Amino acid sequence: MASAERPLSPHLQVYRPQWTSVLSISHRATGVALSAGAVVLVWWLAAAAGSAEYYASFQGIAGSVIGQLLLFGWTFCLMYHLCNGLRHLMWDAGHWLELEQARKSGTHVVITSVALTVICWIAGYAAM
């Protein structure tokens, strides 16, 4: 049993976050965000299967500035979770396990996620 005076280790008050831990926490957070996005996806499908008025009201919300920002964020979450998931698969295969390689691959994950998000949105607007 831990003493009341001594925090459990590693404690957030004494532990400085590292790049790999920030990426790990971000991977979990994007998983939660994707779950919330899945609920919105079901809402969109229900609206599409429903009446024209119901779909138009959904489109009004999704087409608003806030709706577009949420969709952009959800797109980034999808791309980040995908890229970081592939990084984890590489780790499971025994690759990129050295600390410097893990840091570099994390940086590549973030850069690639941002690039893929921007590419998706540019391609989406070009198709309109």
Image (spheres, rainbow, N blue to C red):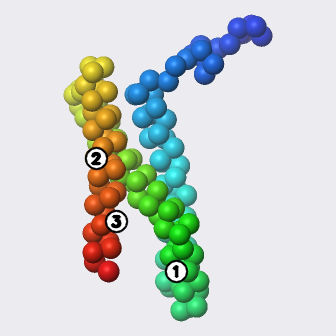
Q: Which mark is residue 59?
A: 1
Q: Residue 112 carries which label?
A: 2
Q: Hey, what amino acid is under mark 2?
A: Thr
Q: Hey, what amino acid is under mark 1?
A: Gln
Q: Hey, what amino acid is under mark 3?
A: Trp
Q: Which residue is drawn at 41% across and 58% down?
A: 75
Check the image and report above or below for 126 versus 77.
Answer: below
Q: Which residue lies furthest to the right in this view?
A: 4
Left or right of residue 121: residue 23: right
Measured as percent of width and height from the top left, residue 88 is found at 32, 36
Q: Which residue is drawn at 39% across and 47% down?
A: 81
The CA distance from mark 3 to mark 2 is 14 Å
Left or right of residue 99: residue 11: right
- Element class at badge 3: helix
Looking at the image, can residue 46 be seen?
no
Q: Residue furthest front?
A: 65
Nearer-N-terminus badge (2/1): 1
Left or right of residue 48: residue 103: left
The residue indicated by pointer 3 is 121
Check the image and report above or below for 127 versus 70.
Answer: below
Measured as percent of width and height from the top left, residue 69 is found at 50, 62
Q: Which residue is drawn at 59% across and 83% down?
A: 57
Q: Residue furthest bottom?
A: 52
Q: Could you classify mark 2 by the number of other residues whose Cα lies within 10 Å: few (under 14), some (14-19), or many (20 or more)? A: some
Residue nearest the viewer, comparing 77 with 45: 77
